Amino acid sequence: MKDLSGRIAALDPGKRELLLKRLQNQADQRAREPEIEEGPPSSPPIARFDVVVLGGGLAGQTLARQIKRARPSTRVLVTELRPHPVPESAHKVGESTVEIGSHYFAEVLDLKHHLTSAQLRKAGLRYFFSSGDNQDVASRVEMGASYFPPVPSYQLDRGRFENTLREENVELGVEFWDRVKAGNVTRDHGMHHVVLERDGSPVTVACTWVVDACGRSGLLKRQLGLARESGHKCNAVWFRLARKIDLDVWSDSPSWHGRISKGLRWLSTNHFMGRGYWVWFIPLAPEATSVGIVADAELHPLSEMKSFELALDWIRRHEPRAPKWWRNIAAV
Ligand SMILES: Cc1cc2nc3c(=O)[nH]c(=O)nc-3n(C[C@H](O)[C@H](O)[C@H](O)COP(=O)(O)OP(=O)(O)OC[C@H]3O[C@@H](n4cnc5c(N)ncnc54)[C@H](O)[C@@H]3O)c2cc1C
């Protein structure tokens, strides 16, 4: 502290004034931010924890694991709306991990055994830009690795991943309650109280820390009125196919094949890019494929792709090469 005061005193007056202004702005902003309501819980808590994580998806369960590994005596509860185990192959989007995320899963959370044995190694991101009517994949400009990037990343089957996280977290001592809907959060004498709906009845749990990991349902964001409009308007639709889609058979061109070793294109997160859209192909272990369309709503209205049949039709029109190889299409 003494050192900090000394450093502030040593600043020239202009810089000192700027620092004071910044600190004042931060204090004003904090004063304007909505706070969790203070008051006694609506019913006596049925249990107490150090940390309650609302939402047992990827973020909630990885955080619970990280805390429990670092501090085994910390009492952690994860509450999840959906019944567990969740289905494989068709659980959630968010399947293509980036290298920093993979490092976190493999090294910080010690999940390398799961990633290397139950998920697919990812051969980086790959982009195919439009060329004419997009019939000839070999004539499209392709951007992507010609070998496995040295820092590993993985294509995640989110169902498999979240089931494994739950099993291994429970072994570590994390409490996991599924089929539980998290509701209002209040605070009383430094403790948080969370109302949970279990088997149709409300119960309250108490905790020191509460974490909102409910994803898009944005529990605390809604409770505290923190939502903001976004100017970025795009839509996404997706489905999974119960089969491998091997890009290597999309062209007979020897130079196209010569550029990249066999099998590598399939293992990439493949993006087929066009005006105002991209279509993704992500392979999932053991033999499924995640397919999705991300599109600018002004150029490609959602009404043109909002069912499985419409999405297939849309892909047939914009990416005619793709469905050519989808025989016996079956959505997972
Ligand atoms: C189209 C699309 C494509 C994407 N592609 C990628 C990608 O390739 N790679 C990538 O890294 N990311 C991708 N993302 C982002 C990724 O999906 C999310 O960042 C990630 O899933 C967030 O994980 P999460 O745990 O925060 O949320 P979720 O996985 O949604 O988990 C939230 C959990 O909270 C539960 N829940 C919700 N409400 C309650 C409640 N009231 N009480 C209890 N539980 C509740 C839900 O059931 C759910 O299990 C994509 C997103 C979209 C929309």
Image (cartoon, rainbow, N blue to C red):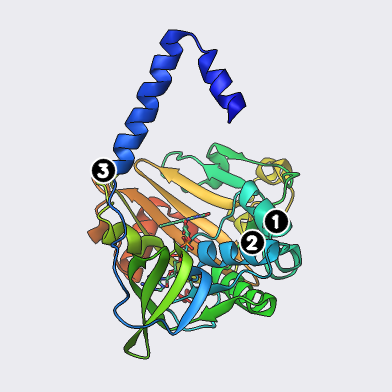
Mark 3 vs 2, N-terminal side: 3
Whether pointer 1 and pointer 2 mark residues with C-beta atoms closer than 8 Å, the reply is yes
Q: Tell me how far mark 1 sits from mark 3, CA to CA.
A: 36 Å
Q: Can residue 218 be seen in the rendering of this structure?
A: no
Q: How many marks?
A: 3
- Three-letter code for the amino acid on which mark 3 is drawn: Arg
Q: Which residue is mark 3?
A: 32
Callout 2: SS = helix
Between disc 1 and disc 2, the foreground one is 2
Instruction: Count neighbours of disc 1 (C-alpha within 10 A) and say few if under 14, some if 14 to 19, many if 20 or more.
Output: some
Q: Which mark is residue 142?
A: none
Q: Which residue is mark 1?
A: 108
Tell me where residue 30 appears, x and y as whole percent.
33, 42
Q: Decide: is 163 above or below 261.
A: below
- Three-letter code for the amino acid on which mark 1 is drawn: Val
| Residue at x 32%, y 83% (from the top left corner) | 43
Mark 1 vs 3, N-terminal side: 3
Instruction: Count neighbours of disc 3 (C-alpha within 10 A) and say few if under 14, some if 14 to 19, many if 20 or more.
Output: few
Tell me where residue 96 appears, x and y as whole percent.
56, 56
Q: Which residue is mark 2?
A: 66
> In the rendered view of the protein, which quadrant contains the N terminus?
top right
Callout 1: SS = helix
Tell me where residue 204 appears, x and y as whole percent.
38, 80
Mark 1 vs 2, N-terminal side: 2
Instruction: Count neighbours of disc 2 (C-alpha within 10 A) and say few if under 14, some if 14 to 19, many if 20 or more.
Output: some
The answer to whether the residue bearing label 2 lies less than 8 angstroms from the nearest atom of ligand 1 is no
Q: Tell me how far mark 3 sits from mark 2, CA to CA.
A: 32 Å
- Three-letter code for the amino acid on which mark 2 is drawn: Gln
